[in-house]
Amino acid sequence: AGIRLSQLEQRKQLLEQAQLTLDENPNQKRINLTDPECREQKSIGPGYNLQIATDNHLQIIIAHDVTAEPNDVNQLIPMVEQIEDNTQSLNQPKAIYADAGYASGRALSYLDEKPNVTAYIPNREHVHPDQPEQRFFIKQEFDFDPSALTCRCPIGEAMRLESREMRRGVLNIKFKGTACPTCDQKHLCTEAKYRKVRMTMADHLVRDMNERMDSPAGKQAMAIRRQTVEPVFGQLKEQLGFRKFHLRGLAKVKA
């Protein structure tokens, strides 16, 4: 059986639109032609990313959403806003427990402006404590002055400001070492000719959050989260059999 010319034209337009989407989103590697709005999700293939927030006592879902984003890094702010709207608790004291995937400079800056919210967001080292130790100096060992926009490496050598750019709503400053080729500590710092580090205006908030998560309250917070939201995901999957969406397009999946 032959294929009509109109069908080929329609197919061509679909492929051209898919290629345009890929060109506009360099981080996106593939497009599902059956549902172009979904994105590649880690470990599961094309799909959507379900978001839920529950209260810590009765495991009732108090906020939810679905996105096509393959990670959670941009989802904390809209979820907090939805929680406060749904529970009519704007400016009321509350604690937020999230996992490491929600951590970002933009989210921490947002939370810093909400004194009524105490957030507990671990970094990946808190979640995976058995990871091998860092081979080189980590970013936190560099002396960054956000007011003067200067940086010194762990042995005190000044670094050169190389670039400034806004990323996800936070100013990022990139520094490059100046004395690396002759430094006797270079083997502890980098295999490249010069060490480079990217600092942000939210780095002090990241440090404060790490200190909070290292405290007894932070360790308790990680246990609380595992005991509240994770069982709800388990109930949805195991008891209700909700393991995949059956509709196409973000609007229908959200519904």
Image (spheres, rainbow, N blue to C red):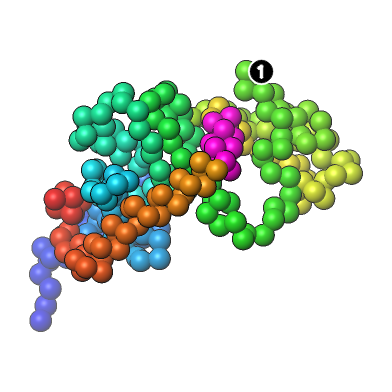
Rendered position, 34 above or below 249 = below
Near-viewer residue (178 or 197): 197
Near-viewer residue (128 or 35): 128
Rendered position, 165 above or below 255 = above
Q: Quadrant of residue 150?
A: top right
Which region shows up in magenta? 204-215
Q: Residue at x 25, y 29 (%)?
A: 89
Count of numbered labels shown in the rendering:
1
Drawn side of residue 94 relative to residue 11, left or right: right
Q: Main secondary structure of the magenta part?
A: helix
Drawn side of residue 120 relative to residue 251, left or right: right
Drawn side of residue 209 relative to residue 10, left or right: right
Near-viewer residue (7 or 93): 93
- Residue 171 in view (yes/no): yes
Q: Position of residue 65 (x, y in %)?
A: 24, 46
Type of amino acid at the residue the image marks with label 1: Ala
Q: Residue at x 62, y 22 (%)?
A: 146
Q: Quadrant of residue 226?
A: bottom left
Q: Position of residue 114 (x, y in %)?
A: 39, 25
Q: Position of residue 50 (x, y in %)?
A: 28, 53
Q: Secondary structure at mark 1?
A: loop
Q: Quadrant of residue 28?
A: bottom left
- Residue 122 in view (yes/no): no
> Which residue in the structure is indicated by mark 1?
148
Name the residue furthest bottom. 1
Q: Residue at x 10, y 69 (%)?
A: 4
For the N terminus, give its image quadrant. Answer: bottom left
Q: Residue at x 38, y 36 (%)?
A: 95
Q: Is residue 206 magenta?
A: yes
